[in-house]
Amino acid sequence: MRTVGSHAPRKYGTIAAATQKLINEVGGLKEAEAVCGRGKTVLHDYADPHKPDRSMPVHIVQILERMAGTHPVTEHLAAEAGLLVIQVPPESTDLEWLAHISRVSKEFSDVLRKTYEFLENDGVLDESEARFLLQEIDENLLVLADMRQAVRRRVGIEE
């Protein structure tokens, strides 16, 4: 499987990184090419941060996100607009309530610990530290979404 960005990883939080993640999540360039009908070079260019004029068309994003079962490009575009997209877990979770609390607590603790570490020396959050925290916060939100869905099911609200 030839993946995008294996030699030059994209910066987390960029459209190139979201596009790279999408292509990789469908199995790489060859698999994405077979599904969407675009050539490997074109697909690679969509994820190239040095080619900002080569954006992936919306219908191609839809095809690949449907196949991947994840939505990295949609999530990125929503974040750019100041919105938050969280995929609600489709099936019931078997986690006990204490397990939910433990997961949420652990993820939130990771965010706080890393924030403190980054600010401890100079009181400044540089770009790479901010990108790392953004990823940690996104992981925290997914855990919260899972717990939220379990609570909604408990009160009889189905999505």
Image (cartoon, grey):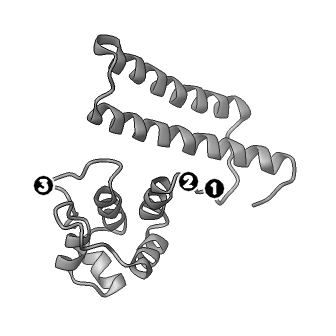
Q: What kind of residue is marked 3?
A: His
Amino acid identity at mark 2: Leu
Mark 1 neighbour class, 10 Å CA radius: few under 14, some 14 to 19, many 20 or more: few
Element under label 2? loop
Q: Local crowd at mark 2 within 10 Å, few (<14), some, or many (≥20)?
A: few
In the image, what residue occupies the spot 68% across and 41% down?
A: 147
Disc sitting over residue 88 in the figure: 1
| Residue sitting farthest toward the bottom | 37
- Report which quarter residue 104 is drawn in: top right
In the figure, 136 relative to 4: above or below?
A: above
Indicate the quadrant where residue 29 lies: bottom left
Q: Residue at x 36, y 64 (%)?
A: 22
Q: Residues within 10 Å of mark 3 (few under 14, many from 20)?
A: few
Residue that protrudes farthest toward the right in the picture: 156
| Residue 10 percent across, percent down from the top left | 24, 52
Secondary structure of the residue carrying numbered label 3: loop
Residue 133 position, x and y percent, is 40, 34
Q: Quadrant of the C terminus?
A: bottom right
Query: Split into 4 quadrants, where in the image is the N terminus?
Result: bottom left
Residue 95, above or below 26: above
User: On the picture, is 146 further left or further right than 17?
Assistant: right
> Separation of disc 2 and disc 3 at Cα?
31 Å
Q: Does 25 appear above or below 140?
A: below
Taking depth in this image into account, of 142 and 130 the one nearest to the observer is 130
Residue 98 x %, y %: 69, 28
Residue occupied by mark 3: 7
Which mark, by number, is residue 83? 2
Q: Left or right: 18 with respect to 79?
A: left
As drawn, is 23 to the left or to the right of 66?
Answer: left
Considering depth in this image, is 105 or 133 the residue closer to the camera?
133
